[in-house]
Amino acid sequence: MAITQLSLFLMNQPGQLVDAVGAISGTGANIRAMSIAEANDFGILRTIVSDTDKVCAALKDRYLITRTPVVAARMDDRSGALYPILTALNESNINIEYMYAFTGTGPEEAYVVLRVQDPETAEAVLHANGVGTLSDDNLSL
């Protein structure tokens, strides 16, 4: 099952990122991963948190927030580990819109977050190729 990514739209100005991270931290939710992309006047903070409902409820009046289902594929934290994941998706004609990575809780564990058109199909392909994925339930541990 896909995980939920939160995207917060921030003005591209000093202090916006620290305020957003402070607001998320103030909810008690753990930030598992994040990525920021910028455009001319705004930035998009994409984040994976341990409790999306709590974060959304606390920040909905301060930020424009969207929820997006994404796939978090497990890989070993070693050179070349991403290649079989990308190959499996490519061979199934699954396009990756964007991606970013984060380390897991184990010493050799990492994850790649993948935004694809059909997360369920992508997960089925990955599972058929022996690649594990996270669910929202895994993030609250």
Image (cartoon, rainbow, N blue to C red):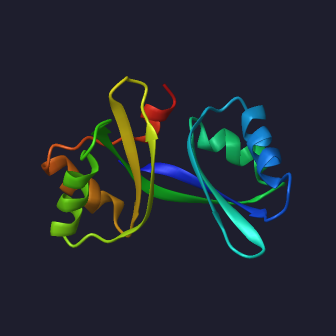
Q: Is residue 19 left or right of residue 85?
A: right
Say if 124 sits above or below 50 in the image: below
Q: Nearer the viewer, residue 62 or 110?
A: 110
Residue at the image point whose x is 13% and y is 50% from the top: 128
> Quarter of the image holding residue 54?
top right
Residue at the image point whose x is 83% and y is 54% from the top: 62
Q: Is residue 113 left or right of residue 92?
A: right
Residue at the image point whose x is 38% and y is 42% from the top: 111
Residue 98 x %, y %? 45, 65
Say if 98 sits above or below 26 in the image: below
Say if 136 sits above or below 140 in the image: below
Quick one: which residue is furthest to the front in this view?
79
Residue 36 x %, y %? 63, 57
Residue 102 x %, y %? 46, 41
Residue 39 x %, y %? 68, 73
Quick one: which residue is furthest to the bottom in this view?
40
Residue at the image point whose x is 48% and y is 34% from the top: 139
Q: Is residue 50 left or right of residue 123?
A: right
